[in-house]
Structures are given as C-alpha cells and as structure tokens.
Amino acid sequence: MKKIVFDIETKNTFAQVGSRDPVALDISVVSIYEYDKDKYSSFLEGSLAKLWPILESADLLIGFNSNYFDIPVLDKYYPGDLTKIKSLDLLEEIKKSLGKRIGLDAVASATLGHSKSADGLQAVAWWAEGKIDEIIKYCEQDVKVTKEVYDYAVANKSLKYKSLTDSLSFPIDLSEYDRVEKAVINYTLPF
C-alpha cells in the first residue's frame, strides 16, 4: 500500500483574506513523506505539477485536519479532484474516538514526548520575510510529527493527550484504512 503523509503551509491567514474558507488561502509549501521511498520532499507553489503524479499514485493520503483544510486548499491548484484519492484525517479519527477535537501539538507531546517546532502563523510570517527554507523545515517537521502519531496509532491502537493534570490514553482504530482502493484515472495527463 502506497501511503503519503502530507501537510501544507499558506502564504496568508484567514484574517488576511477576510474569509474562513480554506480555499481563499494560497499555498507557500507542501511537504510529503512517502513510505515506499522513506523520503521527505517539499514543493513550492510553482512546482506543484511535480507533486500531482506522486499524490495520484497514492493509495492513502494521511494528514491532520487535512479533509477540512489541506485537501481543499490543494484542490484549488489541482487540475482534477483530490477528494477522489482515499484520505485519512487523523483529527477526524480523534474526534470520532474522543468526541472532541485535540490539536496535533497536544497529541504529539503526550504520545511522542515531543511536539511541533512552530505554528502556521509563524510560517505565514516567514513567507512575508522571504524565509522559505524555514517554512520548508517547519512543514517537513509537521509531516514527521504527523507520521509518528499515525505510526504510533497503528502500532498501539491508541493515542494520548494532555489533560489539565495528566496524560490520558484513548483508543483509536485505523484498520479500515489498510484496504487498498486505487483510483483508476490519472488526473493530470491530458486527454
């Protein structure tokens, strides 16, 4: 099964675009991890055409808040429909299990003992300052943390989060995502 963990960073914020619709935002960087190649890669907005064949060959896209945020923003640039590729949104699965949303940083710090290196607002500031390498490092770190949370969940069928007084464990079953459901069309090839 070809799995890809991914994350995006944007050039702007909801406040800057005057909308809460993710599609109103613009991509600065997309970072991915390909399990079959054990490889991290990053793509700037101008090189997204190189990303599409990689995503199209995936059996599963793995992200955090990705069905609400990352996929709609990416789909704005994609010539096909990324929602046709099977995806696992870890935040959605956490909400199914807990009944509430828990941020990636809270889950990672309790489960893995480390957390993200920055936040999306910092990435937007780096974009404005022209610090593209910083954004890439941050985005790849987010992908790494998301991958490690996913790997832990698969291996242990549980995750943890910090409450006010303790770290609490909760069950999470991702086995339904182990089945391959391959799309049969290549969306970026001309017809």
Image (spheres, grey):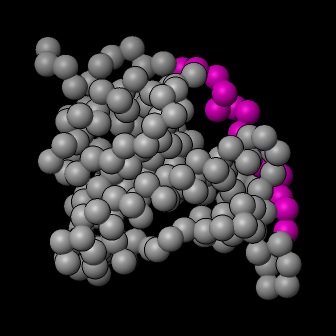
Count of residue discs? 0
| Figure check: 105 above or below 70 | below
The C terminus: image quadrant? top left
Image check: 72 left or right of 128? right
Q: Residue at x 41, y 64 (%)?
A: 138
Residue 23 visible, this angle: no
Image check: 22 left or right of 4? left
Image check: 92 left or right of 21? right
Residue in the foreground of this view, choosing between 55 and 181? 55
Residue in the foreground of this view, choosing between 133 and 108? 133
- Location of residue 25 by image quarter: bottom left
**Which region of the structure is painted magenta?**
168-181
Q: Residue at x 66, y 27 (%)?
A: 178
Residue in the foreground of this view, choosing between 175 and 155? 155
Q: Residue at x 28, y 33 (%)?
A: 52
- Location of residue 185 by image quarter: top left
Image check: 183 left or right of 81? right
